[in-house]
Image (tube, helix red, strand yellow):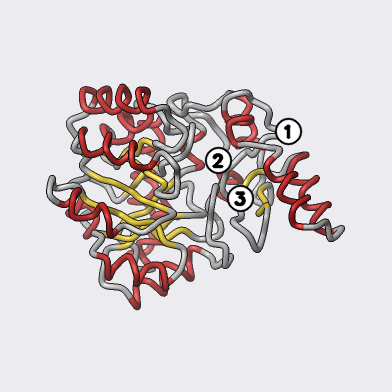
Amino acid sequence: MQTRITHLLGIRYPIIQAGMSWASSNSALPIAVSNAGGLGVIAAGPMRIEELHRSLAEIILGTSKPWGINVPLHNERSAEFLDAAFEARAPVLIASQGGPKEQLARFHSIGTRWLHVVTSLEHAKKAEAAGVDALVAVGVEAGGHPAPSEVSTLVLVRKLARECRLPIVASGGVADGAGVAALLALGADAVELGTVFIATPEANVHENYKRAVLAAGIDGSTLVARGRLPIRQLKNSFSAKYEAAERAGMPADELGAIFNSASLKQAALDGDVDWGKVEAGQSAGLVDEIRPAAEVMRRLVLELEAARYRLASL
C-alpha cells in the first residue's frame, strides 16, 4: 500500500510506532518495527544524552530501514537531543510541544524529514506555514498528552484533510488494522500507534505497566488535569485522588501539588501502577496479549488488508 507518507519516509506500510517516553526510549522497539516495514521511533524525552547516543548507534547498526526520533521541543534538554539526532543523521524527526522554525533548515540540509505533532487546525496551519514535511494529528483518545480541546481523532483528521495540503499521520484510538483502515479512509496518509506497542517484549517498561494495559477496558483510561495540559492515563488511585480533589474545588496550587506527586517514571520503571502515571490510550481496551513487535506489525498489516477487502466487497 502506497501513500504520501510511505513515499515521503521510504517505509513499506503506512504504520508508525509512536515515540513513547520510557516505552520506546531504547533501540529494541524501534529496530523491530522498522525491520517489519513500519517506522520505529525512539523517544528521547527521558533519556540521558549518553544513553541516547548509544541507542542511536544501536539503531543504525540494527536496521537498514528508515527510523525516527521523537523530540519534545519544550524539554530543557531538547538542544542536546536535536544535536544527537543531527549527528546520527536521523531519517525522520517527530517534534512536539514547540515551534519548528529554528531547527527546520538545519535538518532539511541533511535530508531529515520533519513531522510535527499538532492537536488543532490552528497548530497545523502554523506548522504547515513553517515548512514541515508532514503533520501528526493527535486526538483526545491518545495516551500521554492528547488534544486539550478533547476533539476526537476522527474529527481532527477529517478537518485537517480538508484544510491542509501536507500529508497527515493520524494518532489516537487505534490498536488494530481495522482502525488503521478507518483513518486512512478519512484522509490520513499513515497511522501512528502507541498503546499496542507497550504490550510487547521490546517495550522498555515494567511488566506491571504492560499487564495494566492488558487489564484495561475501553473505559479504563481517563484525562487527568482537564483544562490545563491534560494527560490520558489508565484509571488508578492517583487519577481518582486528583479527580476527587478537582470535584471538591481544590485551589490550583494544591491540584498542581497532587499532579506533580506522581510521575510516568514511577509507573514505567518502578512498576507502581497504582500511584504512578500509567500513560496509555483508550485503545488499551483493544489490547489483550503481549506479542513481539514484529508480530504486532504482521497482524496490523493482515487486519488492514482484510478491512480493505471487506470495504471493497460492500
Q: Quadrant of the C terminus?
A: bottom left
**Are the two marked residues, 2 and 3, in contact with CB atoms closer than 8 angstroms?**
no
- Sequence-wise, the earlier of marks 2 and 3 is 3
> Alpha carbon of mark 2 to alpha carbon of mark 1: how far?
20 Å
Quickly name the residue at label 3.
Answer: 232
Query: 234 left or right of 189?
Result: right
Residue contact at pointers 2 and 1, CB within 8 angstroms = no
Of residues 107 and 171, the one drawn nearer to the viewer in this rendering: 107
- Can the viewer see residue 309 in this picture? no
Find numbered disc 2 in the image and state the secondary structure of the residue it sits on: loop
How many marks the image carries: the answer is 3
Which is nearer the N-term, disc 2 or disc 1?
Answer: 1
Does residue 252 appear left or right of residue 270 in this picture?
Answer: right
**SS at circle 3:** strand
Q: Residue at position x 64%, y 39% from top?
A: 277
Name the front one of labels 2 and 3: 3
- The residue lying at 48 percent from left, 52 percent from top is 174
Percent position (x, y) of residue 98? 40, 56
Which of the two discs, 3 and 1, labels the residue nearer the N terminus?
A: 3
User: Which element type, helix, strand or loop, lies under badge 1?
Assistant: loop
Residue type of the residue flagged with mark 3: Arg
In the rendering, at what x and y percent does residue 130 appear? 27, 66
214 horizontally vs 109: left or right: right
Residue receiving disc 1: 274
Q: Position of residue 198 (x, y in %)?
A: 50, 35
The x and y percentages for residue 16 are 34, 46
Q: Which mark, residue 287?
A: 2
Mark 3 touches mark 1? (CB < 8 Å): no
Residue appearing at x 26%, y 32% in the figure: 35
Amino acid at dot 2 = Val
Residue count near mark 1 (Cα–Cα under 10 Å), binned few <14, some 14–19, many ≥20: some
